[in-house]
């Protein structure tokens, strides 16, 4: 009887160690995979009216992507500091290739590249060049800037959700 009790205790402690090790492993894997990104992705930040909020302090020469959800449609806004120090914003979708579902941009050096057609677009041209195979600009009339934040109007984002209906990013 004592031998059975010893084996039971040993089995119980082994199971406990296995459970603890599994939990630690899962937490580690979850943390690791959540932090693997080829481009900087930022947590959603909205105000009470549903406008997208971008903190200027987060913006650098590396493109940041801001997720936004309008109903069931997932969208992204990109923001980046241009060579002149200004912050440029655009919808992360191509004005021409959006319907393919792969018309979104990833950064390569001082350019962004359309993942559908491969068009290379200079970061300094974001928000300055309209029409064609380039990111949909978020113009001054669709956002408010102060010293610390950029607020992109919910109405503007909702009006442009059709660019993201087939999005497959």
Image (cartoon, grey):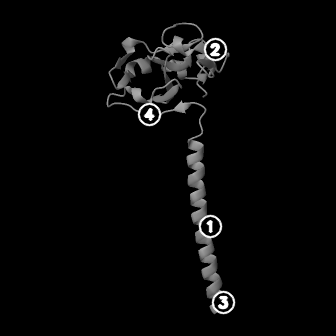
Residue 87 placed where, x, y %?
A: 44, 19
- Tag 4–tag 3 contact (CB < 8 Å): no
Q: Which mark is residue 120?
A: 2
Residue 115 placed where, x, y %?
A: 65, 21
Left or right of residue 71: residue 7: right
Mark 3 neighbour class, 10 Å CA radius: few under 14, some 14 to 19, many 20 or more: few
At x 60%, y 24%, the residue is: 106
Q: Secondary structure at mark 2?
A: strand
Of residue 87 and residue 47, the one placed in the foreground of this image is 87
Per the image, the residue denoted by label 4 is 44
Please identify the quarter of the rendering in which residue 13 is found.
Answer: bottom right
Q: Secondary structure at mark 4?
A: loop
Q: Is residue 95 above or below residue 167?
A: above
At x 45%, y 15%, the residue is: 138
Per the image, the residue denoted by label 1 is 18
Instruction: Tell me which label, 4 or 3, sits earlier in the chain.
Output: 3
Q: Separation of disc 4 and disc 1 at Cα?
A: 36 Å
Mark 4 neighbour class, 10 Å CA radius: few under 14, some 14 to 19, many 20 or more: some
Q: Is residue 31 above or below residue 118?
A: below
Left or right of residue 124: residue 5: right
Q: Residue furthest front?
A: 84
Of residue 112 and residue 143, the one placed in the foreground of this image is 112
Per the image, the residue denoted by label 3 is 3
Foreground tag (3 vs 2):
2
Please identify the quarter of the rendering in which residue 6 is found.
Answer: bottom right
Foreground tag (2 vs 1):
2
Instruction: Tell me which label, 2 or 1, sits earlier in the chain.
Output: 1
Q: Is residue 162 above or below residue 6?
A: above
């Amino acid at each position: 009887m004592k031998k059975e009790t010893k084996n039971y205790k040993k089995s119980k402690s082994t199971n406990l160690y296995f459970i603890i090790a599994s939990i630690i492993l899962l937490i580690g894997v979850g943390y690791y995979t959540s932090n693997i990104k080829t481009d900087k992705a930022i947590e959603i930040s909205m105000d009470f009216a549903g406008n997208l909020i971008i903190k200027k302090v987060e913006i650098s020469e590396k493109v940041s992507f801001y997720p936004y959800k309008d109903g069931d449609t997932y969208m992204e806004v990109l923001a980046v500091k241009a060579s002149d120090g200004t912050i440029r914003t655009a919808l992360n979708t191509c004005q021409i290739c959006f319907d393919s579902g792969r018309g979104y941009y990833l950064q390569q050096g001082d350019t962004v590249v359309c993942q559908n057609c491969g068009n290379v677009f200079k970061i300094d041209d974001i928000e300055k060049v309209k029409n064609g195979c380039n990111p949909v600009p978020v113009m001054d009339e669709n956002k408010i800037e102060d010293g610390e934040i950029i607020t992109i109007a919910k109405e503007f984002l909702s009006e442009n959700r059709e660019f993201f209906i087939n999005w497959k990013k």
